Image (cartoon, rainbow, N blue to C red):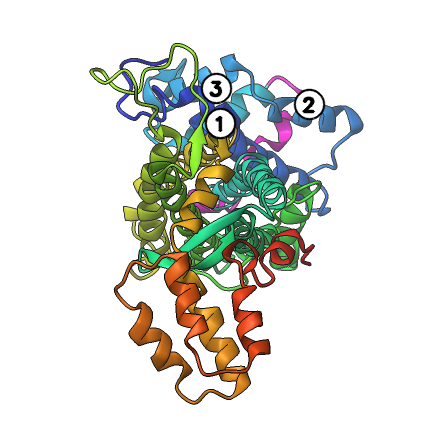
Amino acid sequence: MNTSALSPLDGRYAVKLTALSAVMGEDALLGARVHAEITWLTVLCGLNLPGIKKLSVAEQKILEKLADLSAQDITLIRTLETKGYGKIPATRHDVKAVEYFLRLKLEKTSLKDRLPFIHFALTSEDINSVSYALLLSDGVAKALLPALEKLQKELLKLSKKEARSVLLARTHGQPAVPTTFGKEIRVFETRLARQLKELKQKQISCKFSGAVGNFNAHVAAFPAVNWPRAAKQVLIALNKNRKLKLFLNPVTTQVDNRDSYAELFDNLRRINVILTDFSRDMWQYISTGLVKQQPVKGEVGSSTMPQKVNPIDFENAEGNLQLSSALLDFLASKLPVSRLQRDLSDSTVLRNIPVAFGHALVAYESLLKGLSKIAFDKNFASEELAAHPEVLAEAIQTILRAYGCQNAYELLRDFTRGRHLTAGALTDFIDGLNIPPSVKMQLHMLEAEKYLGLAPQLAEENYD
């Protein structure tokens, strides 16, 4: 743990974020930039341009190896940016440092004659645009999605396990009608499933068209080349074996419009909202005793009250989900906006995308941990339901309506509203109704534990 870290993501939560750090950390960003530059050089070498030889098999291997950055490579890039190296002064520019790094690495190889074509006709935003798109794609596919899919699977397993476990539903916090715990969990599973389906179909935009998006320098140097087609070749190469694909926006300024970013962030924010709702419900179920938590040996729930087993995993999830959602909301409204052809206020904001993802992933992992420690208390739930026979009022008035009783609702309202009823009082009420014996028998046979409608089937159904 980095005890001097300003952010808990790099401190107490760092161990939970290794998968995300590997694909969205600072080192990953440098790697993405190198990958983008090398891919562009590879495309240029295949265009049959004057003065640019095709890559040999050996040269292709040199570039492939170079794309896999070592710790020493990363240190060199940062040194080029901050201090300078040899005769190269400090660039104070992270993308230019990558360009000089590639020149240093290739100047003693057979590729030295193609050094002028490293970063050819590009602006740094071309490289950054592709690089952040790569980070977003990997962050979702390799870190967030695996956790979310596992969470959905656990919710589905719980909902089917408890499909017939009776629960007193509450609306406005008041006893309503019976349901099952499994069906209520299935509500969250189906909501999550819908958002995950959309998330998996997301594509992330980028631009690769020069200083203000017009291919000005490209056309000036080689006017006969179809440069938009050449730029697409970069994306074709980068999209191989990629779950969330990248695509080129055809018309941009110096920056991509990043509307696809906003769409992605909104999708993730909706997932976070659903899981915030779930976290609060679980907190409530635990608070009322309907859900029990398995104590962890040696774990402390309070510094002064040793008996406590707090719902810390669901509380942790709620806080991190809300923090992530706040950042995602800001990112979705900020990043698609740029003054005229470019302003730099987005640069520091882009660096905080992994922070929003990090808090989300911490939350997802907390929910998985919380779910692994809980058990639904069926006996407690049955006792609670038995203490509220008034929940059958809906069934009684509806059956009376079906019989043809004109004022069925009003009868039940006047008898039940605001009163604590007993099963005996409800029996006496039914006996006093002026209805046929067969209808009375139907009402007497009502049982709260069996008044479930289709709740078990809804929990167990396999939905597409």
Viewport quadrant of the N terminus:
top left
Tell me the amino acid under the disc marked 3. Answer: Ile
On the image, numbered disc 1 is attached to which residue?
373
Q: Is residue 90 above or below residue 346?
A: above
Mark carried by residue 74: 3
Specify which label sits upstream in the sequence, 3 or 2.
Answer: 2
Q: Quadrant of residue 327?
A: top left
Where residue 387 appears, x then y in whole percent?
Answer: 38, 50
| Whole-number angstrom distance, CA of label 1 to CA of label 3 | 41 Å
Viewport quadrant of the C terminus:
bottom right
Is residue 379 in view from this perspective? Answer: yes
Tell me the amino acid under the disc marked 1. Answer: Lys
Residue at horizontal 22 percent and vertical 15 percent from the top: 303
Residue at horizontal 64 percent and vertical 53 percent from the top: 232
Is label 2 or label 1 in front? 1
Q: In the depicted view, which residue is nearer to us: 446 or 185?
A: 446
On the image, numbered disc 2 is attached to which residue?
62
Q: Is residue 260 above or below residue 56?
A: below
Mark carried by residue 313: none
Tell me the magenta residue range: 108-126
- Residue 120: within the magenta? yes
Determine crowd level at label 3: few under 14, some 14-19, many 20+ residues with C-alpha closer than 10 A: some
Tell me the amino acid under the disc marked 2. Answer: Ile
Q: Secondary structure at mark 1?
A: loop
Q: In the depicted view, which residue is nearer to us: 317 or 128?
A: 317
